Amino acid sequence: MAHHMEAELLDGVRYVNLDEISRCLHLSDFDRCYRRSTLIPHRLNSEIVDTRFVKPVLWFSPAMPSEYHNMYGNVSFTISMSDLLRSFSFNFYYIDRIEFDTHTSTRVLFTEKNYDNVFETIDFKEYGSPLKRSRWRHAIQCESGYSDYHSHKVEIAIEANREDRDWLYESCDLVANNHSCANILTFSNNRARYDPHVCHRYNLFGRPCPSNFFPEHTRSILCLQYCVQETSYNRFQILV
């Protein structure tokens, strides 16, 4: 059950460094981007704030080690915060907050447009802000209605035009992720269903994931089927 609410400062917050952010996709969605030579955006929707004026966005999140299970898919487009902010002059806004039984998500908007009359600006100096800027950090724990030690995730929507999306496509490193925990069955009331927390694209909606692969499998697919160059182990650049 998801509870949608206004974004607000977090209590009981704990931070870790934010060095890189990633846009993680299933292999099928990565293939669509590869064939178009760009990142494909989505409309920004919210049950809390009016998002009609925002152009389609690219969803990113703090990068995680490739051996950890990634619920968002198989391949991440990954870029450092320093490289990103050298190329963009963002304004930073809250979108909303969604509380699940397993974690809380604060959704934020990075945009070069001014939406001061639509969204609340993030104050990085306030204690409990989901993001800190002096040395980029993000909140990984907070208090919630479920627990005093609730997992917290920051979800970053980047408003990007076609030129911006092309630049991100070419500038990001590719990382092969661990998505092997997808398709795990759980049992409730003698009925089997997919664990909705391990695959955001398929299992969340009760469908089997077609690419529940370990990173080694995805790495071999990238090497064999796409024009990429491995720059370090399990990190690739698309050859354009």
Image: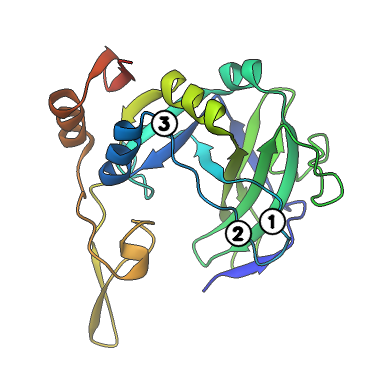
Instruction: Tell me the kind of residue under disc 2.
Output: Asn
Type of amino acid at the residue the image marks with label 3: Thr
Q: Disc number at residue 38? A: 3
Assign a secondary structure to mark 1: loop
In the current view of this chain or complex, which residue is farthest to the right? 117
Q: Which residue is mark 1?
A: 51
Is disc 2 surrounded by few (<14), some (14 to 19) or many (20+) residues within 10 Å?
few
Relative to 229, say whether 130 is above or below.
below
Residue 76 vs 173, above or below: the answer is below
Q: Report which residue position mark 2 lands on.
A: 45
24 sits left or right of 97 in the view: left
Q: CA distance from mark 2 to mark 3?
A: 22 Å
Q: Residue at x 54, y 65 (%)?
A: 100
Of tags 2 and 3, the one toward the viewer is: 3
User: x and y percent of residue 161 in the render?
Assistant: 58, 34
Where, by quadrant of the figure, is residue 148 drawn?
A: bottom right
Identified by mark 1, the residue type is Thr
Q: Please determine whether, in this image, residue 141 is positioned above or below residue 114.
A: below
Crowd rating for badge 1 (residues with CA inside 10 Å; few <14, some 14–19, many 20+): some
- Residue 237 image label: none
Vertical side of 9 occupied by 68: above or below: above
Q: Residue at x 20, y 40 (%)?
A: 214
| Front residue (pair 168, 8) | 168
**For marks 2 and 1 on the same chain, the one whose residue lies earlier in the sequence:** 2
Q: Residues within 10 Å of mark 3 (few under 14, many from 20)?
A: some
Give yes or no for contact between labels 2 and 1 (Cβ–Cβ under 8 Å): yes
Left or right: 108, with 114 as reference point:
left
Question: In the structure shown, which secondary structural element does the residue marked by tag 2 occupy?
Answer: loop
Cα separation between marks 2 and 1 = 6 Å
